[in-house]
Amino acid sequence: MYKNTISMNFTEKLHNVVNKNQSLLCVGLDIAVERIPAHIRGRANPALEFARNIVEATADLVCAYKLNFAFYEAMGAGGWETLRQVLEAIPEDVVTIGDAKRGDIGNTSEMYARAIFEDLGFDAATAAPFMGRDSVQPFLDRKEKCTFFLTLTSNPGSRDFLYLDVDGKPFYAKVAETIMSWNEYGNCGFVVGATHPEELAGIRATVGDSSILVPGIGAQGGSVEASVRAGCNERGEGAIFNVSRGVIYASDGEDFAAAARNRALEIRDEINKHRRG
Amino acid sequence: MYKNTISMNFTEKLHNVVNKNQSLLCVGLDIAVERIPAHIRGRANPALEFARNIVEATADLVCAYKLNFAFYEAMGAGGWETLRQVLEAIPEDVVTIGDAKRGDIGNTSEMYARAIFEDLGFDAATAAPFMGRDSVQPFLDRKEKCTFFLTLTSNPGSRDFLYLDVDGKPFYAKVAETIMSWNEYGNCGFVVGATHPEELAGIRATVGDSSILVPGIGAQGGSVEASVRAGCNERGEGAIFNVSRGVIYASDGEDFAAAARNRALEIRDEINKHRRG
C-alpha cells in the first residue's frame, strides 16, 4: 500500500488540496540528472535527494505534482525505483499525476493502467486517446482516478494534425467531444497547452466542469493571465497549471530549494490573481 | 556497446535478414509472467529464461523481434534490466523493434529516442505521430534507425478518430501522407493493423517502399492472405507481420520452445505462400 492510495476520489482530493493550499499550481518533477545542483550530485541517489528537497519546499504551495516517466526511464535500471521513492515523499493530501502519455490497445492498456494506478498508486494519469475508446477503457474503468487525455498540446507541431478540419470543426474539438461521451464516471480530464488560450476557452465550454491540465506556462511561453481566464470554470477551479523547469531549476546553487519555493509562490499567486469566483 | 548497434542501416539490415531467413515474420516477445510455463517459473529470472528459449528456437525463422515495453514495465523494478538482457539474447543479424508507442514533446521526446536507440540499441521503434512533427523530430533525426508511426491500429476503437473525414479522406490517410513529408531520410515506417486489409492496400500505395509493421494476424483475427497481398510492395517485401501470443504461448508445457518453433514455421510459410515477387 502506498500513501497516495487513500479512499477518496480524485475530484474530492483535488478540491480539498486546492482549497487548503489555495493553489492551482502543479509542479512537474522532471528531474534531469545533469541539471541537479553540483553540491548534491555526489550523494547516493541525487535525483531522489533533489526531489525530496523540492517537495519539502513546495508541498504547501501546490495542488499537485506531475512525474513525467521519460525522465525516470532515462535514469536507467534504477529509475523506476526512484520514481516510486519520489512518489512516497509526496504528502498524502497532494494530488499525484503519472505523466506517461500511454496509449496502446487491449491487454497492454490494462497493464499500463494497473502499473500507474495500483502498483504505483498515482491519483491521475495522462494518456493518448487517438486509438479510440477500447484502447483506454482500462483507464476509464478506474472510477476513483482521473485520466487526462491529450487533446491539444502546446508544441508548434500540434498544428500538423490536431487542427485538421473535421465536419467544420478542428480535430481537437472532436476529440474533446468524443471523450465527453466516454465520461460516464466523471473521471475524464483533458490536457490543453497554455499556448492556445482561445482554444482552451472553447474546450472549457465543451467539457463543463471536467479537470483540465494546462502545461506550457513559463518555459513554453504561455500567458498565465490568458490561460487562467480561459481554463478555469465559473468557480475559478477545474484547471491545473503545470510548471516544471521554471520552478525546480529556479537556482542551481545551494539555495535551489528556497529558490524553487519562491518561484512556486510567485506563480501560485499570479494564477490566483486571475481566478474568478 | 550492445550487439544490435551494428553499423548498417535499418533498411539494409531488414533486407538481409528477410533474405537469409526467408521470412517476414516478427515475433512479439510480450512476456506476461503468469503465462510462463510452470516448470520455468521457479528459476531466478523466469521471463528472461523463457525469452531466451523462444529466441533460440525461432531466430532462424523470423526477420524481427518486437518488445512491447508495457510487459517489461509490469515486471516492476527489474523489468528494464530484463528487457535489456532479452535484447542481448537476440542474434546480431535479426532486427529489433522497441514497441514503446511513445509520443511526447520537446526534450522529453529526445530522451525517449535516446533511451530506445542509443541506450538500449534497438534498430527500430514505434511512436505516436499525432502531436506533430516536432514531437517526433528526435526519432526522425536517427537516420540509420526506423520509426514505425501508429497510423491505423487493429482495434475496434480505431474507428473513433482515425476514420474521421478530413477533406474527403479518412484521418489515417492524412496521417500517412503527412508522415511521408517527414521522410527525407527514408527512415519512416507505418503501423497498420491486419484487421484493415483494404486500408492497408491504400496506405501501401501512399507510402511507396516504406516499411509497414502489421500487427493483428492470429489472436486479433486478421487474415494472413489478405494482409500479405495488401501490405507487401511489388517485390513481396516491405511489410513485417507481427505475432506475439500465437507463437510464444503455442504450448504451456515443457515443449513450449519446440511448439513456438512449429507455430513460427507455419506462419512464416503461410506468409511466404502469398508473397509476390
Image (cartoon, coloured by chain):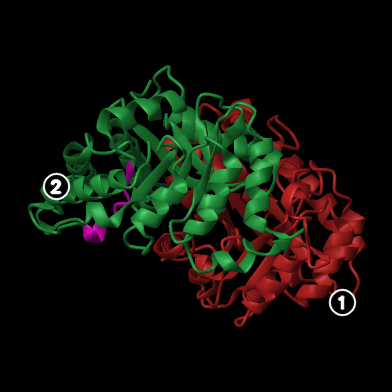
Chain colours: A green, B red
Of B93 and A54, the residue lying toward us: A54
Residue A134 magenta: no
Q: Quadrant of residue A276?
A: top left
Crowding near pointer 2: few (<14 within 10 Å), some, many (20+)? many
Q: Residue at x 58, y 59 (%)?
A: B127
Judged left or right of residue A216, residue B11 is: right
Q: How many marks?
A: 2
Q: Position of residue B251 (x, y in %)?
A: 74, 34
Q: Quadrant of the N terminus of chain B?
A: bottom left
SS for callout 2:
helix
The residue furthest top is: A7
Q: Position of residue B167 (x, y in %)?
A: 79, 68
- On residue B214, the disc is none
Crowding near pointer 1: few (<14 within 10 Å), some, many (20+)? few
Nearer mark to the viewer, of 1 and 2: 2
Q: Which residues are magenta?
A: A25-35
**Depicted A210 relative to depicted A166: above or below:** above
Q: Residue at x 57, y 29 (%)?
A: A186
> Which amino acid type is marked by label 2?
Ala
SS for callout 1:
loop
**Depicted B92 relative to depicted B161: above or below:** below
Of A245 and B249, the residue lying toward us: A245
Q: Which residue is mark 2?
A: A257
- On residue B234, the disc is 1
The chain carrying label 1 is: B
Judged left or right of residue B121, residue B11 is: right
Q: Residue at x 46, y 27 (%)?
A: A11
The residue furthest bottom is: B184
Q: Position of residue B269 (x, y in %)?
A: 86, 57
**Depicted A227 relative to depicted B275: above or below:** above
